[in-house]
């Protein structure tokens, strides 16, 4: 039976030590609460930190571990020093401010980073210890961004999902992080990567593209040997739980207390952690402006501000607390009377019944974070409004604004806009309030936390099916057949691409030179008198001649322009002219001048514009422009010049010349009873299309191809060829 491994920084259970006694109590937080509400119906375990240091647990560690495991919780224990550096340090002083665009608060500290890596490794060890073959691993949030790759490196076939609950910033912000590549590599270890809104998906894909060059097509990227999917999954809440909680007798009693305190006044409610991302000072200033503009509302409204203490030892949070205290005091002193306090300020954690009571009593929820991944408070407020008489004012910077479009959406930095939103809310008719709230409620009820989780897990299963589909096209099952057919055959032909096939793709001739192993494999294959080996490359003739000219093999250069039989001379497939280069070269050079990092390569009968080292985003734009320019220019060219788009290149050459025509020269020589062709990009598709039905065609990498099978890397191709080459020697 499939088992779900939920992994998060915190367990939904906290360990608290009082008077040398260990107590278990529920964790606080929307994410853990939401996840815990749906997992009960699943076969699942939860891996996470229990909220206490190893030093504090002491000799009770085994007892804690057994107590938690009896409830299917698997604790990850970390020291006080690691808590300070991994959690309070890298997670909350580096990633949290940076990803929320508060770059002025971001700390870049090597010790923080070292501890972050170490704790992610602890989580990996804990997972590997309990991992079973069919387990599904779902990792949550920014504290564990290295974990997907760590697991993948140890268990290649694991089914791994990753969800980040905070914003993912634009590349201009993300690039400030010194360890940006390591973070992306860590996340890309997952099969499915989930975000709350499309903006975050776009930012993530853009960062991946700019740093690694991987392109996203419909949210799908090919990362080495795997498909990785990114998608939007706006987290829901346990709608039924919040909707029915209003009827709870304890909640009703709390509601009565609040109503007696506000004495019939309209209630504006604001609930947040005391965090600089939440925009609390701006919210208070907007309320100040509202009271200034609307003296008729004095003594008729109460603003209940709940600011839950957060990171109380961090300087930025201490300063924020001081600022909020001063603003509350100033506004209350400015407008308050003996019978009316404009702001009712609660700086403490509220138990659940009190929270629901405030939702119940409030006429308006004012939720205006400067930046927020989702904001479940807004959804919880709407869920409690069974009668629909309420107004939600919501920041456009909160992910929830994409789900709750019927709310009054505001820019949290625009005090006048927020003040006017309050005015609009108070003037809104009951009918309009009900219509908007009911539309939001219906949506939240349909896409609740269970639907959200199941949607993510279903998509994770689907992406694994896609991966497995291409694995079936791989050589796991067919390798034995290839070896068997090779042994029984007497006339064999090998058609082998070079860059990206026999060696990893190289951007310079120096990096592209063959190593001793590949030369040995080629020589061993060629030694067998029954074998014909042909290297069909896009490299120029001088490179191919230098490295392979003395080998007993066939050679093709410039994608079929030049050909050479065993120990023969180079010749062209047909008479060619290079006159056209005088007109095309200035065009390519112009685009190279406008695209830093790109360059033009000139071969005998070919011109190539390379853009692998250019800024990926600019290169995509320029390559499209250049391709269109060249296609229009060459449309009526008498030299029959064509434009070919390859792996980070645009190549201009005679349209009648391609690798397929070159391959036919050897295919048509004999009646071969074994043909194996291996290539990695679009230029090799012409070879695959020329093979007879019983030929073996293999693409390096995954994606659409005429090849029958695929391998994940040049190393896998070497392994296959090495195995074949040893058969004739044994």
Image (cartoon, rainbow, N blue to C red):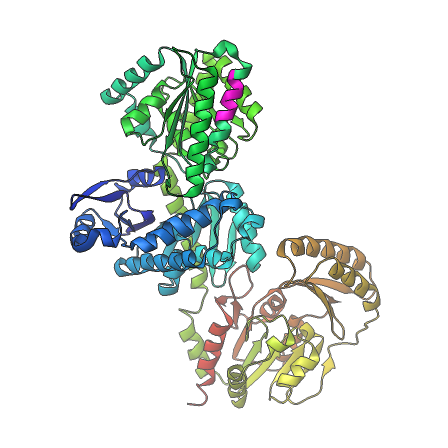
Nearer to me, 40 or 16: 16
Query: Residue drawn 64% across and 76% down?
Result: 509
Query: Residue drawn 51% across and 29% down?
Result: 282
Q: For residue 362, what is the image quadrant?
A: top left
Tell me where residue 172 appears, x and y as whole percent: 58, 49
Query: Residue drawn 42% across and 21% down?
Result: 438
Q: For residue 38, what is the image quadrant?
A: top left
Tell me where residue 431 appears, x and y as whole percent: 46, 13
125 lies left or right of 230: left
| Viewer can see residue 217 | no
Q: How many marks?
A: 0
The main secondary structure of the magenta stretch is: helix
Tell me where residue 631 appears, x and y as whole percent: 75, 57
Q: Is residue 556 above or below residue 127?
A: below
Q: Is residue 551 above or below residue 648?
A: below
Q: Is residue 226 above or below residue 517?
A: above
| Viewer can see residue 7 | yes
640 lies left or right of 662: right
Tell me where residue 646 appears, x and y as whole percent: 64, 63
Nearer to me, 544 or 677: 544
Magenta residues span 284-291
Q: For residue 306, what is the image quadrant?
A: top left
Q: Is residue 7 magenta?
A: no
Nearer to me, 704 or 367: 367
Q: Is residue 290 magenta?
A: yes
Task: Point out the image quarter for the C terminus.
Answer: bottom left
């Amino acid at each position: 039976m499939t088992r779900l491994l939920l992994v998060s920084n915190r367990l939904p259970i906290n360990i608290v030590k009082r008077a040398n006694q260990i107590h278990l109590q529920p964790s606080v937080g929307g994410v853990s609460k939401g996840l815990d509400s749906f997992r009960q119906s699943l076969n699942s375990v939860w891996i996470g930190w229990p909220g206490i240091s190893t030093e504090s647990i002491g000799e009770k560690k085994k007892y804690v571990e057994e107590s938690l495991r009896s409830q299917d919780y698997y604790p990850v224990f970390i020291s006080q020093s690691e808590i300070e550096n991994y959690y309070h340090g890298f997670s909350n002083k580096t990633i949290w401010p940076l990803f929320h665009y508060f770059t002025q608060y971001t700390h870049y500290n090597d010790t923080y980073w070292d501890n972050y890596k170490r704790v992610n490794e602890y989580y990996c060890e804990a997972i590997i210890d309990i991992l079973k073959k069919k387990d599904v691993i779902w990792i949550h949030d920014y504290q564990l961004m290295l974990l997907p790759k760590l697991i993948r490196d140890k268990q290649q076939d694991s089914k791994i999902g990753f969800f980040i609950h905070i914003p993912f910033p634009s590349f201009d912000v993300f690039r400030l992080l010194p360890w940006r590549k390591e973070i992306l590599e860590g996340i890309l270890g997952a099969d499915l990567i989930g975000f709350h809104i499309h903006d975050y998906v776009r930012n993530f894909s853009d960062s991946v593209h700019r740093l690694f060059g991987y392109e996203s097509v419909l949210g799908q990227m090919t990362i080495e040997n795997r498909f990785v999917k990114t998608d939007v999954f706006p987290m829901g809440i346990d709608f039924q739980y919040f909707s029915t909680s209003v009827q709870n007798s304890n909640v009703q009693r709390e509601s009565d207390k609040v109503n007696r305190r506000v004495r019939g006044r309209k209630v504006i409610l604001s609930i947040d952690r005391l965090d600089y991302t939440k925009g609390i000072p701006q919210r208070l200033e907007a309320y100040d402006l509202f009271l200034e503009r609307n003296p008729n509302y004095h003594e008729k409204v109460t603003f209940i501000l709940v600011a839950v203490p957060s990171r109380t030892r961090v300087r930025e949070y201490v300063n924020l607390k001081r600022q909020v205290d001063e603003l509350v005091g100033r506004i209350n002193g400015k407008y308050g009377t003996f019978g009316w306090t404009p702001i009712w300020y609660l700086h403490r954690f509220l138990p659940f019944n009190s929270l629901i009571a405030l939702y119940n009593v409030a006429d308006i929820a004012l939720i205006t974070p400067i930046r927020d991944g989702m904001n479940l408070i807004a959804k919880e407020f709407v869920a409690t409004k069974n009668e629909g008489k309420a107004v939600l004012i919501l920041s456009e910077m909160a992910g929830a604004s994409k789900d709750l479009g019927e709310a009054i959406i505001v820019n949290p930095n625009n005090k006048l806009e927020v003040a006017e939103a309050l005015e609009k809310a108070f003037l809104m008719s009951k009918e309009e309030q009900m219509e908007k709230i009911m539309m939001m409620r219906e949506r939240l009820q349909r896409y609740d936390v269970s639907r959200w989780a199941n949607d993510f897990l279903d998509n994770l299963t689907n992406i694994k099916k896609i991966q497995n589909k291409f694995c079936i096209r791989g050589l796991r099952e067919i390798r034995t057949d290839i070896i068997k057919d090779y042994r029984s055959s007497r006339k064999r032909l090998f058609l082998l691409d070079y860059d990206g096939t026999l060696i990893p793709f190289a951007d310079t001739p120096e990096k592209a030179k063959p190593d001793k192993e590949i030369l040995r494999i080629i020589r061993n294959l060629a030694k067998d008198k029954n074998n014909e080996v042909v290297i069909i490359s896009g490299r120029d003739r001088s490179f191919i001649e230098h490295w392979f000219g003395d080998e007993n093999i066939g050679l093709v250069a410039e994608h079929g322009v030049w050909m050479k039989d065993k120990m023969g001379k180079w010749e062209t497939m047909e008479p060619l002219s290079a006159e056209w280069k005088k007109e095309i070269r200035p065009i390519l050079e112009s685009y190279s001048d406008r695209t830093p990092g790109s360059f033009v390569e000139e071969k005998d009968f070919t011109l190539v514009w390379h853009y692998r080292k250019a800024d990926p985003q600019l290169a995509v734009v320029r390559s499209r422009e250049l391709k269109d320019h060249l296609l229009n220019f060459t449309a009526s060219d008498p030299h029959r010049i064509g434009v070919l788009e390859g792996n980070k290149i645009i190549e201009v050459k005679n349209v009648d010349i391609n690798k397929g025509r070159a391959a036919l020269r050897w295919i048509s020589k004999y009646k071969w009873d074994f043909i194996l062709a291996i290539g990695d990009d679009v230029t090799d598709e012409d070879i695959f299309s020329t093979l007879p039905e019983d030929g073996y065609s293999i693409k390096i990498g995954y994606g659409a191809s005429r090849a029958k099978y695929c391998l994940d890397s040049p190393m896998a191709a070497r392994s296959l060829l090495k195995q074949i080459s040893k058969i004739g020697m044994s």
